């Protein structure tokens, strides 16, 4: 496994809670699942890539770490690759 990104608000520092299917940001705010979509794989012999998005617009809007965490966006979005069960197994193995 590689090293964690040194930026304190990078996705590497968000904690995933599989039972609730949500992430918790370094400031302690939940990031809720809101959308899943398939992205076509460049290799036609492989299945499409599954993308799952998580965010919490309200929490980001009122967060004291907003300037450190966000760039030009109004809220943070976590993008996870793969299906939920794959991710649950990944975090268990970690």
Image: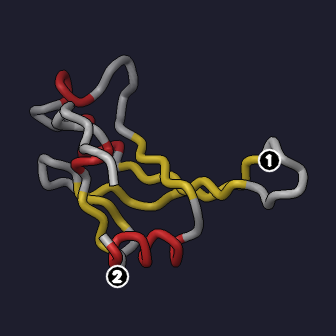
Contact (CB < 8 A) between labels 2 and 1? no
Q: Where, quadrant-wise, is the N terminus in this rendering?
A: bottom left
Residue at x 35% of width, y 35% of height: 75
Residue at x 60% of width, y 53% of height: 51
Judged left or right of residue 74, residue 62 is left
- In the rendered image of this protein, does residue 72 appear above or below residue 79? above
Percent of width and height locating residue 87: 46, 69
Q: Secondary structure at mark 2?
A: loop
Residue that protrudes farthest toward the bottom in the picture: 19
Residue at x 30% of width, y 70% of height: 94
- Which one is nearer the viewer's eye here, 86 or 52? 86
Percent of width and height locating residue 77: 42, 42
Q: Secondary structure at mark 1?
A: loop
| Figure quadrant of residue 47 | bottom right
Percent of width and height locating residue 38: 72, 54
The tag on residue 27 is: none
Residue at x 28% of width, y 47% of height: 12
Percent of width and height locating residue 57: 35, 43
Judged left or right of residue 52, residue 77 is left
Number of residues whose C-alpha sits closer than 10 Å to that of mark 2, classed few (under 14), some (14–19) or many (20 or more): few
- In the rendered image of this protein, does residue 87 appear above or below residue 45? below
- In the rendered image of this protein, does residue 35 appear above or below residue 88? above
Would you name the residue on which mark 1 appears? 40
Residue that protrudes farthest toward the right in the picture: 44
| Nearest to N terminus: mark 2 or mark 1 | 2
Would you name the residue on which mark 2 appears? 19
> Which mark's residue is nearer the viewer, 2 or 1?
1
- Which one is nearer the viewer's eye here, 8 or 56? 8
- Which one is nearer the viewer's eye here, 48 or 33? 48
Mark 2 and mark 1: span between their CA atoms?
28 Å
Residue that protrudes farthest toward the front in the picture: 1
């Amino acid at each position: 496994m590689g090293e964690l990104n040194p930026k304190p608000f990078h996705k590497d520092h968000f904690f995933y809670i599989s039972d609730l299917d949500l992430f918790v940001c370094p400031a302690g705010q939940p990031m809720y699942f809101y959308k899943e979509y398939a992205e076509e794989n460049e290799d036609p012999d492989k299945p499409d890539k599954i993308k799952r998005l998580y965010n919490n617009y309200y929490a980001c809007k009122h967060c004291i770490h907003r300037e450190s965490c966000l760039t030009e966006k109004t809220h943070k979005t976590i993008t996870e690759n793969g299906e939920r069960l794959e991710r649950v197994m990944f975090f268990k193995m970690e």
